[in-house]
Amino acid sequence: MIGLVGLAHLISHFSQLLLAPLFPWLKEAFDVSYTQLGFLMTVFFVVSCAVQAASGFLVDRHGPRPILLGGLALLGVAAFGFASATSYWMLAGFAVVAGVGNGVFHPVDYTLLNRKVSAARLGHAYSVHGITGSLGWALAPALLVPLAIAFSWRVALMAAGTLAFGVLLVLWLNRGQLALPAAPAKPAAGGAALAGEGSLDFLRIPAVWMCFGFFFFYAVVLSVIQAFAPEAARQIHGVPVALAAMCLTVYMVCSAGGMLLGGFLASDPARCERIVGIGFGAAALVALAIGFAPIPALAVPALFGAMGIASGIAGPSRDLLVKRSTPENASGRVYGIVYAGLDIGQALAPLVFGSLMDQGNFRGVWLGLVLMQGVLIASAFQVRRTRRTVLASA
């Protein structure tokens, strides 16, 4: 179960970076600016946000399997659609299709893990889930850029679509493992009962909205690192193009390694906020060094790796923050709403930071990244404070 969910999650994250590594080719092919390319990501994540919130209700009502298989199929269709695009607006149209497909994964994944994995293994399940996501992000530039260089960006995107349909076939052949009955109605944490299937009562839980805010700022940080940080670092420190292209893959691979360690640290739920604070605090210090310290160009990929390890360690504890605020019978709905914050952050960040890139304000990109990491740390501790306040008054 953990492996199948992780494999699907890998494709979700891989598909989020179908376009960003290919921006240099797309910019030339369609004669557009970085802000316009960033808008494609905004379209993707706005649609994904809306679908994510809605799909949580569908998962709780109908089970996760059909929702998951449908999402994977749409991602494959979108990849082939991008490959065949002849205009900027065709890219935007298939960004909508990709956003619909991407919107189902977190409600599906966490519903399956929370209900089918034992409590003793849950921290490790979150760790594997995070690792496969990071590997999906790492795989996208590692696969797409060499194919674009060797052949064309269209061939690269067709390969991405083939990969998505291949994973869909694997999950279809193992679909029995993904079966899950609808969740029974049970009382929420702290004694607050949810009225029943399709209920909106969970929206009254303050910690749910604090988790939403936390994931919004996490998404801004992530979006900047994925789309703009390597190029901004290249411009500041004169990093060779080939070396700059490695930065995101190094970050994601190291993030996956950090998540492996983070899975063990998350075995004690009482310390998850502290782990999140320490991990993202260390990442912020590294980001500050990349943006403003006089470092040699060859050191930049290594610093991206250090930033990835620190962020990865915080990953499983980050997911545990949400688990501790989730009523058992509303898992899909809560994760749909909370992870909608992830999509909203990734929708807005490219517009702001893409504008900074177009203005040549590369240090401003890194300063904004550091500030968002600071807000992220504060919001993690606010989740704990809100949850404790609710439990004390229950």
Image (spheres, helix red, strand yellow):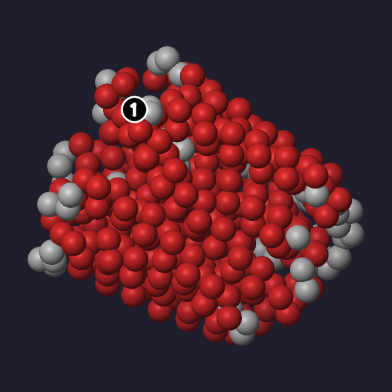
Which quadrant is home to the N terminus?
bottom right
Q: Secondary structure at mark 1?
A: helix
Query: On the picture, is 367 further left or further right than 7?
Result: left
Outermost residue toward the front? 150
Q: Position of residue 124 (x, y in %)?
A: 64, 73
| 351 versus 175 height, above or below | above
Outermost residue toward the left? 294
Q: Position of residue 247 (x, y in %)?
A: 31, 55
Which residue is at 61% across, 42% downward? 103
> Foreground: 280 or 86?
86
The quadrant in which residue 263 appears is bottom right
Which residue is at 20% across, 36% downward? 358
Asked if one can make out residue 92 in the rendered structure from this viewpoint, the answer is: no
Which quadrant is home to the C terminus?
bottom right
Kind of residue at disc 1:
Leu
The quadrant in which residue 206 appears is bottom right
Asked if one can make out residue 242 in the rendered structure from this viewpoint, the answer is: yes
Query: On the picture, is 289 further left or further right than 155?
Result: left
> Foreground: 339 or 14?
14
> Foreground: 72 or 211?
72
In the picture of the structure, the residue carrying the numbered disc 1 is: 26
Which residue is at 30% across, 48% downward? 245
Q: Position of residue 139 (x, y in %)?
A: 47, 49
The quadrant in which residue 66 appears is top right
> Foreground: 289 or 327?
289
| 147 versus 374 height, above or below | above
